[in-house]
Amino acid sequence: MIQNYGQNSYNNLQNYSQQIDQVQKQLKKVSGQVHSSTSQLNDIYDYLNGLQQSGAANVYYITKAQLTDTDFLQTMLNYTSENKKITTLQVVMKNAPSSESNIKQVQRLQNQVNLQLRGTPLAHDQVAMTGEPVSQAINQSKLSHHFMSLLAIVIIGVMAAVFIVSRAILQPFYWIMLS
């Protein structure tokens, strides 16, 4: 009887040990899921914090009187398409089109538009920006992006011209060494 009691206790302890192992495995899985959820929530909070600090957090109310105003109706006719799916917004810059501040302002506008559209049904729609400041900003970014390749092409072109004019390969290197 004592032996049976001891055997039963041993079996119960083994079962209990196995259950503890299973609970520990499940707790590890749950811990991983909680960590993943926390990371996703942190990303959402970062987005909402950035959104709150942007111009998208500003709320603009249009009253019924403003909606029926002839100026507003004329503006709607001028800047939206007939099906009201395309809206045009005109921004007038204070400085010259090639001004560095305009280029930065265009980049800020693009970032703000993209930020305001995130999380809305318009998030995947196309936003087009045109005008002289925009084309200047695009040209400036392309020029700075491809500057090293343009410099290499110019150097190779000058060296090829020197090789052709001197009709020798080592002569231009000799000129460079003496100067």
Image (spheres, rainbow, N blue to C red):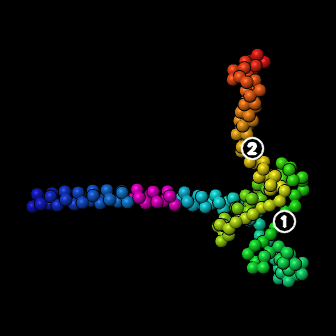
Q: At which x and y percent is residue 159?
A: 73, 29
Q: Quadrant of the C terminus?
A: top right
Residues 122 and 8: in front is: 122
Q: Main secondary structure of the magenta part?
A: helix
Residue picked out by circle 2: 144
Quadrant for the N terminus in the image: bottom left
105 vs 120, left or right, is: right
Q: Residue furthest left?
A: 1
Badge 2: few (under 14), some or many (20 or more) residues near its Cα, within 10 Å? Answer: few
- Packing grade of label 1 (10 A; few <14, some 14-19, many >=20) is few
Q: Is residue 66 visible?
A: no
Residue 55 part of the magenta-drawn span? no
Region of the chain picked out in magenta, as a range = 27-37
The verdict on residue 32 being magenta is yes
The amino acid beneath tag 1 is Gln
Instruction: Say which element carries label 2.
Output: helix
Q: At x 73% / y 64%, what residue is drawn?
A: 127
Residue 162: numbered disc: none
Going by the image, does 3 lie left or right of 146? Answer: left
Q: Which residue is mark 1?
A: 90
Residue depicted at 87% across the width and 61% down the height: 92
Q: Is residue 71 above or below residue 101?
A: below
Residue 172 versus residue 123 in the image, above or below:
above
Residue 2 screen position, x and y as percent = 11, 58
Labels 2 and 1 touching (C-beta < 8 A): no
Q: Pinpoint residue 73: horizontal percent, then vertical percent.
A: 86, 80
Q: Tell me: residue 66, above or below residue 90.
A: below
Q: Residue at x 71, y 33 (%)?
A: 156
Lower sequence index among marks 2 and 1: 1
